[in-house]
Image: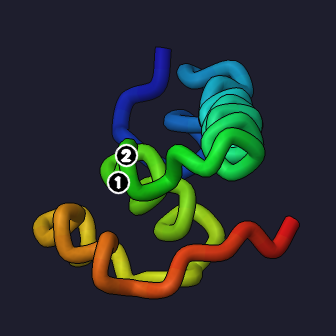
Amino acid sequence: MCAHMSMLCLQEMLNGQKLQGVLTSDEVQEILHARGWELDFPLFTTINRIIHGEVPPDMILRWGAVQKVQLYFPH
């Protein structure tokens, strides 16, 4: 076990789960987009947009406001 929390230690502890979260978010977003549900699930959409750098991280505090932002799925 690591003595301190370095980025390497964190990556080792996560065993790639960080990347799984991104893939899962993208898969969920594809479904939401395909079914026209992005505005029905603004928290999921906001998280996915934060992951991809489309909105700043502090948008998580205002996720309901994402309904006022034009939504698109650029992937």
Q: Give the quarter of the figure containing the C terminus.
A: bottom right
Instruction: Report which residue position mark 1 lands on.
Output: 42
Residue depicted at 64% across the width and 70% down the height = 52
**Image: 40 above or below 71:** above
Q: Residues at badges 2 and 1 in contact (C-beta under 8 Å)?
A: yes
Residue depicted at 45% across the width and 83% down the height = 55
| Residue 28: mark | none
Viewer-closest of 7 and 67: 67
Q: Secondary structure at mark 1?
A: helix
Q: Is residue 22 visible?
A: no
Q: Which mark lies nearer to you, 2 or 1?
A: 2
Viewer-closest of 17 and 30: 30
Instruction: Report which residue position mark 2 lands on.
Output: 40
In-image side of 64 versus 45 (left or right) = left
Residue 58, how many percent across, how many down? 22, 76
Residue depicted at 18% across the width and 64% down the height = 64
